[in-house]
Amino acid sequence: MKNNRLLKYIFFVLSSAMLLNFASCATDEREEEFAARGTPYGYVPQPEKMPPPILTPIYFPTNITEIPEFHWRELFFLAQYLRFNHKARLEIEGHADLTGNVAHNKMLGTKRADAVKEMLAFFGAPVDQLFTISMGQDCPAMVGSTPMGLKFNRRVELVLRLGEPKDNRDDLRESLIPAHYSRAKCF
């Protein structure tokens, strides 16, 4: 089973790399064509000026830390964005539902956030731009123990911060996370 997932990872990365290489070759040819004609109409995309990606939560089944395959593409393009935007910082927040005890949920949130961080690093995101934190069951997306509420609470949320941090400490958990969460968001 793990070998099968590893092969899927490798296939995904290789196919995405070939696609990016093809796009960059096409861009180089197009840039040369516009330079030869001397026309100012050619727009060549610059990776440094890419718009920030739209971040959606990553939802997990009960007690599972493996990232579902349909999130791989989103994480790949997020990793590429972080590669070219060195001032961007990504906070990866692991959450869990109310089932289980508090320590288990905190550990599960940590493992989910670390799995996302490892996949982003695997796809080429600089590790110094990734920060993980486990919220456990403290900040539910939906209050209650209904199946739908539990499903939406088993997640990893991605928070993209653009620009330099306000203070120059290496550990952003203490400086950003408490300010990011208010009593209105964490019930």
Image (tube, grey):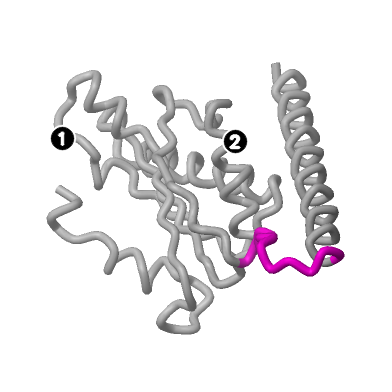
Quadrant position of residue 42: bottom right
Question: Can residue 126 be seen at all in this image of the molecule?
Answer: no
Which type of secondary structure does the marked residue at label 1 adopt? Answer: loop
- Graded by Cα atoms within 10 Å as few (under 14), some (14 to 19) or many (20 or more), the crowding at tag 2 reads some
* Residue at screen point 55% across, 30% down: 66
> 39 and 179: which one is in front?
39
- Graded by Cα atoms within 10 Å as few (under 14), some (14 to 19) or many (20 or more), the crowding at tag 1 reads some
- Name the spot of residue 184 as percent of width and height, x first: 13, 55
Q: Is 70 located above or below residue 84 in the figure?
A: above
Left or right: where 59 falls relative to 85: left
- Name the spot of residue 175 as percent of width and height, x first: 37, 74
* Residue at screen point 43% across, 83% down: 167
Which residue was labeled with disc 1?
Answer: 143
> 52 and 160: which one is in front?
52
Task: Tell me, for residue 73, which label it has, or none.
Answer: 2
Which type of secondary structure does the marked residue at label 2 adopt? Answer: helix
What is the magenta range? 36-48
Q: Type of residue at label 2?
A: Arg
Left or right: where 5 falls relative to 155: right
Q: Type of residue at label 1?
A: Val
